[in-house]
Amino acid sequence: MAGLSDLAASMLAASQGRLEVVANNVSNIGTPGFRSRRIFQQVMDGRQALPVVSARQGAAAANAALKVTGNPLDIAITGGGALLLREGDRLTPAFSGQFHRAADGRIADAAGRVLQAAGGGDLVVSGAAPVLLKDGTLLVEGQAEARIGAFALDLSDPDGLGLSAEAGLLPAEADGAALHQGMTIPSDVDLGTEMVEMTRAARMAETGARVFQVYDDLMGRVATKLGEVGR
């Protein structure tokens, strides 16, 4: 069984982790296509019963509300698939984004993350306002130039997938996914839900602090008893 000090430290760490997830969610409330991280309470080890929290990214609903923007490189995906964005050698999922065509033809968002093509690799087009078909094909002056990847992703990874940018490690393409041009999917962050999570984190931290106080009190009593026995 875990000691009181271990239990208290674990509770405080879990509380801090919950607050970090909430802070990240709230900071992205205005980010198109952002899926909030869902917090799960877990037990680290059944023999020790130390509480921890983990977070998983929520999947976009099949009937996610689309917001019309009219911008040709605002892109949203529905139907169970996800876009992949490359930042360095890391790929992260997205359900929507506001993109632009860089000087080298790559399609990237404001953070510099590059949209990935079907089959892997950076998406490159020659025109600034291509026409997007539902299957992800991009037409420039009526000619197909590239196709945006719609990938089937396991969003249960608490570390945010952490996929390599190597084409051989890409997930399979999603069946039934549809891409929408000139549209975005609003962030699913709900302030009421985040306030509840903050309250839970505060209560867990308070409980952890009380456990530390109980531990200190017990240790003080033990020290006192030992002193009396040694007289």
Image: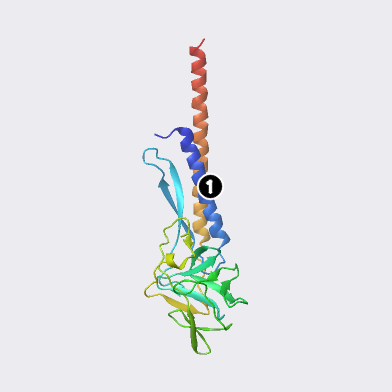
> Please, which residue is most extreme toward the top here?
231
Can you identify the residue that label 1 sits on?
16
- Image height of 189 relative to 134, above or below: above
User: Where residue 71 sits: x, y (%)?
Assistant: 57, 80
Question: Residue sitting at 59 percent across and 76 percent down?
Answer: 100
Q: Nearer the viewer, residue 52 or 68?
A: 52
- Residue 15 visible? The answer is yes
Question: Residue sitting at 51 percent across and 56 percent down?
Answer: 194
The answer to which image quadrant residue 73 occupies is bottom right
Q: Nearer the viewer, residue 23 or 131?
A: 131
> Please, which residue is most extreme toward the right here?
103
Question: Residue sitting at 49 percent across and 37 percent down?
Answer: 8
Three-letter code for the amino acid on which mark 1 is drawn: Gln
- Residue 188 visible? The answer is no
Q: Residues within 10 Å of mark 1 (few under 14, many from 20)?
A: some
The answer to which image quadrant residue 170 occupies is bottom left
> Please, which residue is most extreme toward the bottom here?
142
- Left or right of 48, for residue 75: right
Secondary structure at badge 1 equals: helix
Question: Residue sitting at 47 percent across and 56 percent down?
Answer: 159
Indicate the quadrant containing the N terminus: top left, top right, bottom left or bottom right: top left
User: Where residue 108 sits: x, y (%)?
Assistant: 57, 72
